[in-house]
Structure formats: structure tokens, C-alpha cells
Image (cartoon, grey):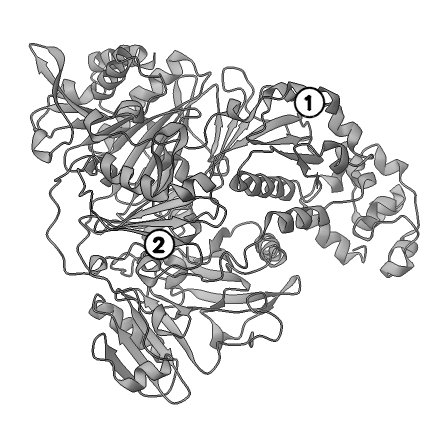
Amino acid sequence: MEYKVLGKYLKAASKSKMSKVDPAFSRIDRKRSGFYVWRIENLQVVPVPKDCYGEFYRGDSYIVLSLSLPGQSPKGPDIQIKENKGSSLDIHVHFWLGAETSQDEAGVAAFKTVELDDFLGGAPVQHREVENHESQRFLSYFPNGIKIKAGGVKSGFNHVERGVFQPRLIQVKGKRNPRFSEMSDIDWSLMNHGDCFIVDLGNVLFPWLGASCNRAEKMKTLEHCRRLRDERGGKANIIVVEDGQEETQVDADVKPMFEKYLQVREKHKIQPADAGGKDEVSERQVASSIKLFSCREEDGTLKIQEVKAGPLSKKDLLSEDSFIIDTGLAGAWVWIGKKASPKEKQEAMRNAVGFLKKKDYPSDTKVTRVVEGAEPSDFKCLFRDWPQPAPTGKVYARSRIAKTVQTKFDANTLHNNRALAAETQMVDDGSGKVEVWCVDSFDIKPLDKSRYGEFFGGDCYVILYTYEVHGREQFIIYYWLGSKSTADEKGTAALKAVEMDDKYGGTPVQVRVVQYKEPAHFMAMFGGKMIVFQGGKAGWKPGEKSIDGPGDKYMLQVRGTSPQSTKAVQVDLRASSLNSNDVFVIFTKTAVYIWAGKGCTGDEREMAKQVAARSPRAVTMVFEGQEKEDFWNVLGGKEEYASEKHMQDDESHPPRLFNICNASGSVKAEELHDFVQDDLIPEDVMLLDCWECLYLWVGQGSNKTEREQAQVLALEYLKTDPAGRDPDTPIMKISQGFEPPSFTGFFGVWDRDMWSKGQTFEEMKKELGEGNMPMQQVTMNGSNGAHDFSDMPKYTYEELAVDIDQLPGGVDPAAREVHLREEDFKRIFNQTYAEFSKLPAWKQKTMKKNNKLF
């Protein structure tokens, strides 16, 4: 048990009167949001490289720190770095314990978490995470899933050496934030029909999809295979194998590779679907099962005593003590009062783990530590009457942009700490030089300066930002990916960003930006004039609308309070697109209207005026509730829109989104933090809790039993809420594709075409297959090219540098270079093929283009 070891370290620290923080924590800026990961190596805290975030070795222990402004999303590695302007940061510290980690490593992780907590002023929420039983918050930090790998520091198995690939089997499990767990061997007996697996042979990837796996697992498996292929320069084939179709989907030329590790005749060894366990990870307990225990220090001894059973009241917590809230198998919370003794504070987590052990709870039961005055909303929801802050009078919107004040600052001062500057990517107020290119036909074309700040959801863009620090030019390369752009456009944007990076000697910072997730500095570059339009090359069907602009009539939803935080997004020109939380600008041939919702602020209206200034026409200000008939005529008539009273209340009960199911006869709910429309999965039944009412959202592909029992599940949810909810709270059941504005208003910008135009499993499967190379070339790549290059049929340079239809038979147009004679290859590329094969794919491609061999 790690807390026996922790006790030893605490005593040692006490004797040495340790006052200095571990050097590994010294780079933390306690005034800014940020995300950090450390691994325990030889009992020392060692920073994990950023490109390895999300990878965990089961033989090790880790510490993960998330600092974010309230409401800021996401809170993981892609966090938007912002300076704290007065409001307290949300701080969460997790220590993650691999299944094979040593007691000493686990003890150091727990001890160093306490030290980190002290360094951060005792404000963090502490979480104990155990492999395969991680909290939803922890998993949400890593949108692409966490990857659990075999080995660890002690085993010496930390990574695969370049050029020496070890075949492996990866299990993919989970609905939203799946785990990618590396198995101990490649064998049918380690697989089951309920999950997905990847047989990774380096040059060939076999995603194997269990017959009972969920759609999300299928899609995430294929996405992960695509990322692995991209990391290998495109030199890997992906062959999808569905459970039961091994004989038909594995072609004869690759079947020996598959059966070398998984012989089809031995498939009977595979485990049933339920052997993989349930995908749901969170369980709500009935109110009566929640119990409160006090932890008091009396005469130097800590005593734990039951206080009461739930439902609980905030008044039950006393500042002089610490408490344990026992929620059964859902875990335990440790609450530390401001006046608790140093011993109570220091040993809180240790006491909680010991408490759970006495209760005979599983060793992987979650434990979370909070301090008085910094309780997260998850904790407050355990109490029926937690005091709320006084109403501010502002409209509540779950996805609105934070009302932060942006000010100019000296980039030179920030860049005195270069490591921090590279990490934050917020280098100045955006007043540097901006150059923008749009992806077009596998290349990029410069955008006219008059259109800087205009983006189309069907396109991708590359932006070069140049600024000066201490008299020297510095660069940031952003590549912006529209939500409806094609995979080819996204790939081209990424490739061109790399090429541009190479052009500047590898010195720029590269930033991948996804539509609707733009960081503060990105918006600041366009000084409040950033606009995201519908359409673009991939955003409209051929002949549907112009791809050059939004047309003569369109409406923009404006969010932001300063030039550094404002962007406008085009929404459908109809009344149902309005939202009382925001400001909208409507453009027509003859007039421009600014519609101001009741909950918007003066700063937001001022920024809307700047957006409206793109038209020379006079602006008419329209306030909600004072609209005239001509205004409604422009929108095609009046319609219901998001303006309900519960959206205009204070933030005392922020909306919460859950995925619910009735597995094993008990209600289970998995909460999704910082939710957006993407979190509504068509295979699920979702519950949106808006306090005054509940919405049951039923996905088209959801389980039949869950659809039939959705109402019962919602009633059970109310009954089991620890806050003691009114059982008569209204419950509204809605179906995917028929969402009312009172529902969509909680998700910010709502895309009506998200599900109708989303890529299906079959489309993705086909797309991945089209990216495969001829097996002859795959075999060559598998042996690093040293032997197979000499075995390929050879031709002269003149025979290969011709049009595709003139190439000799059997020559792959994309791999002409492998057919060059050795002396010709050295003459043309100034290096051997073995040296060439080790270069990044984009560099190889450029060199082949320059030599007319592509």
C-alpha cells in the first residue's frame, strides 16, 4: 500500500524540516493556467515530454497537474494558457498508479502530491487514480484517449528504439475517452468480443473490431490507426478486420503476417464480451447510502467517527475538522476545513485510503481531496443546500467565452523565461505581422489581406505570425482546421505547416487549431474581427452556394468583450438561431441590424458594432423584446429561440450532462465536463440536468432497452441525487435531430448538420484503405529498405521522370525512387537510399518533387 510508504516519507520530511519545493515543480507558474505531467523515476520526479502526454507505463507512477480559469476548456494538454486576472484558478492534482508500479514509486507519488499541494497553497483538489479505473475528469484531459504501455522505469522498457520495432497488441476500450492499453503479448486469449484491438506490426496495422464493441470504440480505433500511420510517414498499411470475417477481409498476400501472431484456427481461445468489463466508469449511489464521517485529532491521535447519513447539508461541515464523505463504490471525498490541524491536512488522503480498506472496498476505489473554499461543483452536488454566490444579473451560457480583460504586455519581459513563452504560445497582444494562406488542391494559396480574419468551416488555413523579442524575429505557425473540411485538406494544412517550419530552420512554434477551440492569441491576431462563415470548398455541396462569401444576407453570432477575445460565427438566418445570452449581427443588401439579447453586456454590444462595421450601411440597434415587424421579416418570421428563464439565472446550478444506462439493474451515470455538441453520441441516451428541468436526449442508435426505459432512468436519477431533488422536476424527452432551442442553447453554436454529414464507419474504413501502399512496397518498408531496395526492378532516371501513363509496368508512381540504380540514386539525392528512408515523409516528398520523381 502506497500510504505505508507515504508515512515513511512524511516522517523523513518532518525530521529534515524540508522547506524547498522539488526542482521539478519550480517551473510551474501559479498565476497562469497550465498542464503538467511528471513520472517517478528512481524515486525522483521527472517531467514528461509534451509529445508523450497521455502515455502511461503500467510499471510506473505519475503526477498530473491541471490549472485552469473557471469555465476554461479544455483543461488538458491543449489548454489555452491565460494569466489569472483576479479569479481563483481551478487546480486539480492527480497521482496515477500503474498496475505494476512499486510500493516505493507509489509512495513517492503520493508524498510529492502533498508537497505539490503545499507549494500551490493547499488549494488543489487531489485525486488518486488507479490504472483502468481513472476518473472521468482525468480521462477528459486526453481527448484522443490514454495509452497504457507495458513496462516502466524499473523494467528498462521505456520506449522502442528507432528502427527496432516490437510487434504489439493494443486494446481499445471506452465510449468517449478510450484507453489504449498495450497487452503483454499478441494472443487470442487476451482479446474479447466486446472491445477493439490493434495488431501493430509496424508496417501493417490490423484493427480488429469485436462483434459487441460500441461505435465509438470502432471510430477511435480507426482514428488511432490513422495517427500511427501518419507518425510513420504514411508508410504503413491499415487492414480492417471485423470479428468473424478474418478469412474474407485478410487478403492472401498479408494473411501470413496476420496468422504469424493470430492463427484463425485458434480463435476459439478468445474471451466473451463481458470478460472486458463494462465501459461505463461512474456510478451514482442512492442518497441514503451516502455517509459523513469526521476526522479529528485528539491527543495526537486521529479518530474517525460517523456523523450522519445523507442527504447532507453544508452546515454539517465544520472548519475546525476534516471529513470523509463515503459514497460507496463511487468513491470517497476528503474535505479539509480551514482550521484543521496540520496533521489532519497532511494525512487526509492516507486516512481516507485506510478508511476504504477497512470498509473492504476495492483497492481501485476513487479518492478525491478538497479544501474548504475551493470545492468543485462535483463535490457541491453531494449537498442539498450548498450556499450559492449572489446573482450577478448576467445570463448563463455553458459555452460562452470567459469575460476576461485583455491588456497589452511587454513580450520581451515574458520571453525572459523562454521555456514558459514556448509553452504558453501567448506571446503578445496579437499586434505582430500576420500572413494567411488557404488550402487549395493539395497546396496553399495566399489570402488577400482584405479577407484576413475570415474563415470558412469547409476550409483549412495556415497562418504565420511574426513578432520581435529582444530585437530578434520569432515565429508561430498556426494551422486552422474547419469542422467540415476534408481529411485531405487537414493533412495538407499540417504538411504545409511542417514545410514552413523547415523553411525557418525549425524555430517556429506550431499550433494546431480546431474550429470553435481557438486560443486567445489566435483571436487576438485579428483584433476582434475574426469571423467563421459557413461553407467553403468542402462546406457546401457542388452548386449549392458560393464558396467565395456568405452571400448578400447572413447572420453572425458575436461573442467576446474585447478585440483580443472576440469572434463571430455565422448561424442560420432565422429567428430560432437567436439566443438571449448573446449579440447577433444581421446583414442584408439594404440594412444592418444588431440584435442584443437581454443577457448580453455593453462590452459585447460594442464588439458587435465593430463586426457590423464590415458593411458601409447604417446600423439599426434592436433590443430583445422591442423588435419591429421589419426585423422579423428579415429572419423569415418569428420562431421560438433559446430564451428560457432558467438560462438567465445566476450560475448557482450550472447544467450538467450525463451518459446514463441501466446496466446490472442499477442506475449509472458518467458525467461529461465542459460539454459541447460533439459529446452527444448517437449510440447513447444522454441526460441534460438544467436543475429546473431534465432533458432526455435519445440518440438514433441508442440501446432499445435504454430508449424504452429512459423516463424511468430519469426518475431514478432524481431519486438518487444526493442534493435531495424534487421528484416532480419536469422531464423532457427529445430525439436526435429534433432538438428545441431551449435545449440547443446550452451547447453554444449548434450545428444542425453534424450527424447527417458526419463520416460514417464505412466511409472512414474505405478512406483508410485508399491510403494503403502496394504490398511490395510495404514489405520493403518493413525491413527498413536496406535489402529490398536492391531487389527492386531498376530503370534509368529518364525512364522514371515521365508522365504516369508512360511509366514502366509495375512501377508505383508515388515510389519511383526505389527503382533507381544505386549510383543514380546517390547522384540525384546526394545520399544513399538507407539515409533517404530515415527522413521525414514530408521531406522525402519535397525532394522527390524537386527531382520530378513524384
Give the number of marks: 2
Q: Is residue 546 above or below residue 144?
A: below
Q: Which mark is residue 594?
A: none
C-alpha separation, residue under disc 1 versus residue under disc 2: 63 Å
Determine if residue 426 is in view.
no
Q: Which corner quadrant of the image does residue 727 belong to?
A: top left
Q: Nearer the viewer, residue 495 or 351?
A: 351
**Which numbered marker is on residue 267?**
1
* Quadrant in which the C terminus appears: bottom right
Q: Amino acid at mark 1?
A: Lys
Q: Secondary structure at mark 2?
A: helix
- Mark 2: few, some, or many residues within 10 Å (few <14, many ≥20)? some
| Quadrant holding the N terminus | top left
Q: Is residue 384 above or below residue 62?
A: below
Residue for point 35% across, 75% down? 611
Among numbered discs 1 and 2, the one appearing first in the sequence: 1
| In the foreground, 712 or 7 | 712
The residue that appears at 27% across and 60% down in the rendered structure is 406
Please give left or right for residue 531 compared with residue 325 in the image: right
The amino acid sitting under disc 2 is Asn
Please provide percent x and percent y for residue 253. Answer: 82, 35
Residue at disc 1, secondary structure: helix
Residue 646 at x, y percent in the picture: 21, 57
Q: Which residue is mark 2?
A: 412
Q: Residue furthest front?
A: 708
Q: Nearer the viewer, mark 1 or mark 2?
A: 1
Percent coordinates x, y for residue 160 in the rendering: 61, 27
Could one spot residue 286 in this view of the protein?
A: yes
Give the class, few, some or many, for how many residues have Cα within 10 Å of label 1's Cα (few <14, many ≥20). some
